[in-house]
Amino acid sequence: MNGRKSIWVLIVTLSVFCLGLLFGCGAKEPTPPEVTGVTLTAAEGAEYGKTGEKHLLGYTAPEDSTVTFSVLRGEAPATAADYACVDGAYIFYAEGEYTVTVYAAKDGVVGSASAKISIAAREAFVKNVTLTAAKGETAGKAGTLYFIGYDVPAGSEVAVAFEKDGAPTEDVIFAPENKTVVFCGAGEFTVTVSAAYGGTTAQGSASVAIAVDPLEVALTSDRRTVTEESGVVLQKTVSYALGDSCKTEEASVFYRRGTSGEFRLAEEETYALEGDLFTPHVAGEWRIDYKATSRFGASGEASVRITSRAAALTLKPSFEGRMRIRTNTPVEIGFLVTGAADKYNVSFDTHGHNVVAEKAEGNAMRLTASAPDAFTVTVTYVHKVTSSQRYSIDLDFYSVDDLTYAPAWGEDPFGGMPGEVLSSMGHLFTVDAKSCGGLPRTLTAANASFEVTASNISADGGDKEAQVLYAADDPAHPYILVNNFGNNTAHGTFSVKMTLTDPDTGYSAVAYKDFTVLPTGNTDAAATKTIADYVERYASYYNVGAMNFTSDLPAHTRENMVLTREGIIMHRTNGDFALNGGNSDFARIDASGENIRLEFRFELFGVNPTTSAVGLGIGLRTGNNDGWAGFFDLTSDGTRLQLSNSLDKGAVRNEMTGAELPLAQPGTVLYLRLDRTVSETTVVYTLSFRTQESGYTQYMRSVYTKTSSAGNPGAPVAQLQFTHRNGGGCYAVEEVRLQRFA
């Protein structure tokens, strides 16, 4: 209650008191309530009689009285600018003499008592300056939040200043409204609080030692192994302290080739680092160092290693088979490359041929051949960093005199001939080519010449060589032979050069083929199995199905024969022992059964040049595989082909006469049929023949008594055997078929 209000209360109270006297004449006068012990004392920590300090009011009044207060400054009521009353305590702002009066009213009468106090101006002060770390924080560490505590006179003007290691600093984050501070960096920080009051000033301070912990830095990547030009996402984390918003971060990239040696600072063009995406441009080992430095002066670093593999390539020819190019004319040949070709060095290997190959624009090479030839250019891509990473293709070419008229072929001018040959066994060359210009014409082996260009063949008893031979010296039927008749152990490799010449233009083209020699075996059983397995493996080429053998084995084939695409061919000439004498078996057929029919195609390439002989025997093994019964023979009288019977056991012959047989000359083709029919008592063999244009003509009929005696023509047949008889010319036996009847 202020002073003016107290005076008015006093006036009203006195008026009521006087009225009571007027109307209460004759009554006993009431006793005013007694107010005692009015005091003003300084609050704890305050100074008595000083401005701005708390002074506690004390008094005693009857409990049932109404208490009021008044305050005078001098003789006049005090104002709000002079004092304030808060919870029974008085704070005096201005100097002067103050009177605090306590009034107690009861039963219409009022009692009072007062206390006086002289207030003098108080000097400024700063007390109890403290720095207290926030709850949960670590005191003495940079980034910790501190509360600043201090006591100053009420109404003072307060200022806060900071020093670091004795010098003024702004390396703090200060929030005056909250009286909080964060110290940035390490050092001795001092907080000074200044208070200005009543024309005086005062200061107080507190200090704290601040340390900086190293930053915890982590660096990881989503992948540790990538290929060139593939991005790696980096994940970086730093444990910055509270308030450490001012910071620097930097990454350094190091590189080494391979997986050993020193890391060196990488050249900028060898990689890209954009934000968190790292992309290596070259293969090798990479180390990325990441360093962070805080505003507080703390630092930390981490690193991650990444392996960059060589970029993969897909390298393919842009054309199929073998390409024809014109001699002495540069031509650009493209090949297909998928992948980072710029990461690789390109080289060309012409394997010693008269060819110049060099890099052209893009994925291509410029090629110049100086002569008609067949050759291979190997294109190799070797990685510039990882030399073990390489890709290569072989591009097949042949150069010709003229692109328009020179011979041409598909993927294989040797017509798909297998690259494996058997020792002591001939393999007929086949040709798949045509001449160009005008109407295309199919070229044959007669338009080709063959040459063994390289040979590396070994055998028991010394080295052997592959020979190119011609059936009956006929260029139309060339074959390759590894002559090793002694024990058939020849093995190794050789290469054949084929030169094709267009007979109309004279232009040539050349092709090569590499062959591997397989040893046939040095025993009859081993040779039989090796040859049978070989024929079965290449059945699609050698057309074994057309022979229609009924045995589980394709044939009990033997040496001294030549394999062809159509079947089995036998022609050993050019000094071969089979030309000069002696029998040589070249195929056996399982032929068990009562009624059988054997059919085959016979083509004559040439008679024996000395004797004009032709000798093909169809041998019979009856009763068992060792029971020889003899031969039906196809021979020559020097002019015409003839059929004869040399079966043993007194065979009954019934030869048809008057048949006009074909001439014994190269190119003659016969289809022969041998029938065996069995009745209750007899066995009958019938030999017939036909040309391609005519039906079968019976030439010979032989009748035998039915028996079971091995080696007797009347006994059941175990095997049929083709035999080259007594050096009898050169011929082919093909399209063999065997049928059985009920």
Image (cartoon, rainbow, N blue to C red):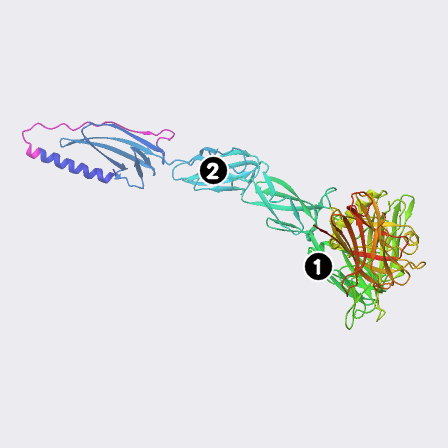
Q: Is residue 701 left or right of residue 276?
A: right
Measured Cα–Cα span from mark 2 to mark 1: 81 Å
* Residue stretch in magenta: 21-48
- The residue closer to the viewer here, 670 or 462, is 670
Look at label 1 and name its amino acid. Answer: Leu
- The residue closer to the viewer here, 741 or 191, is 741
**Which percent across, then down, holds residue 374?**
82, 61
Task: Describe the element under mark 2 as helix, strand or loop.
Answer: strand
Q: Is residue 596 left or right of residue 474?
A: left
Q: Is 628 part of what is drawn in magenta?
A: no
Query: Can see residue 549?
Result: no
Q: Quadrant of residue 718?
A: top right
**Which percent across, then down, holds residue 513?**
82, 56
Q: Quadrant of residue 332?
A: bottom right
Query: Can see residue 498?
Result: yes
**Which percent across, then down, holds residue 715?**
79, 45
Residue ranking furthest to the left: 26
On the image, numbered disc 1 is attached to which residue? Answer: 336
Q: Is 31 part of what is drawn in magenta?
A: yes
Task: Using a 10 Å C-alpha cutoff, classify the residue at mark 1 as few (fewer than 14 neighbours), some (14 to 19) or many (20 or more).
Answer: few
Question: Which label was assigned to residue 193?
Answer: 2
Quadrant including the N terminus: top left
